[in-house]
Amino acid sequence: MSRRQFLQLTAGVTVSAGLAGCADTGAPDPAPVVADHVAARTSPRPPAQPTPSTPAAPSVTATAPPFMGMVPVLMHHRLVDGESGTYDMTPQFFRAELERLYREKYHPIRTIDLARGNFSTVPAGKTPVVLTFDDSSPRQFAVDARGRVDPQSALGIMLDFQRRHPDFPAVASFYINQNPFGYRGADVARALRKLEELDCEIGNHTLTHPNLRSLSDAEVQAELGGLSALVAAAGVPPPRTLALPLGVHPRRRSLLAQGGSGPTAYRNEGVLLVGANPAPSSYRKDFDPMAIPRIRCSSHAGGKGALEMAYWLDRLRRDTSR
Ligand SMILES: [Zn+2]
């Protein structure tokens, strides 16, 4: 298959009607999530090149052509010892995922980096990959009072992998709700500050994980702005990207980009969908930061199936132009 054929194929994939986000599946978003945003896009980007923070010492990649291939944005939910659904993953499966990504020369970035077209941390010859985690369940991330990340948590597993493979950074994007990772009160700030310190992204997944289509405009803004304010109150930068709960859009889609007022004002530069294929590079004209598709990661039934990571990494590996 040629590169062009592959890209055309992936750009045409739409999410099946039975696909919905998160373990507590609600009504799936009936709107095709890829085709409509591709059609709606009339002008090519590309996004502005990131400004080097230290102009006196440009990196090797500063003058390299931007990465133009496909970027897997991987969607994780619960980390559990025994999976019970299609959104669960065992620690063993997650470790194998990291091994495969490393072996196949992927390099983790965050959603906000993809939204902004910032691939400056990705070495030449490697492919950006985004690891996302939805719902802020406790096994995804935990930190004790002394600042030590639980080695049994998903981020702890990534940090352990990074210690053995320093060229595979333990960065991920966590899409949180209220009481993130089971923390409450002052512990929320401690947890979020640790994520920030580790260069992980804290993303918006709304306060209470509602079906946004069922809410009024004011209620949508309260959900998004309330979560943004919760993060800001922890003393870390507020979220700039959003993962749609259940993959469902609000009736007024413009509310995803910005809304609220005063302390609950919010702004998003990227919106994550639920399915079901790799995202195009930020520099391709069919990239829409407000409709970024994701690939599911689950060990349920062996992680096989056309929505899962193994299926798409196999296809990307076969694309010889990558
Ligand atoms: Zn969710």
Image (cartoon, rainbow, N blue to C red):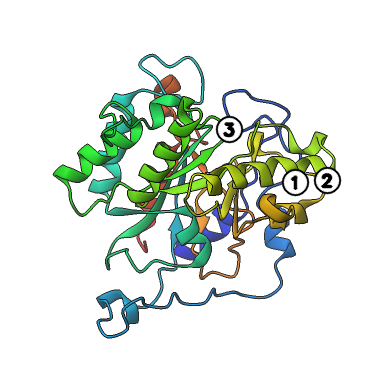
Q: What x and y, as percent, mark residue 295?
A: 50, 41
Which badge, 3 or 1, comes first in the chain's sequence? Answer: 3
CA neighbours of label 3 inside 10 A, class few (<14), some (14 to 19), many (20+):
many
* Residue 96 showing in the rendered view: no
* Residue 182 showing in the rendered view: yes
The residue that label 1 is drawn on is 221
Is label 1 in contact with label 2 (beta carbons under 8 Å)? yes
The residue located at (32%, 63%) in the rendering is 122
* Distance (Cα) linking label 3 and label 2: 20 Å
Give the residue furthest to the front: 186
316 relative position to 156: left or right: right
Instruction: Classify mark 3: helix, strand or loop.
Output: loop
Amino acid beneath label 1 = Gln
Which corner quadrant of the image does residue 26 belong to? top right
Instruction: Classify mark 2: helix, strand or loop.
Output: helix
* Distance (Cα) linking label 1 and label 2: 6 Å
The N terminus, quarter of image:
bottom left
The residue that label 3 is drawn on is 178
The residue located at (81%, 37%) in the rendering is 215
> Which is more toward the observer, 301 or 258?
258
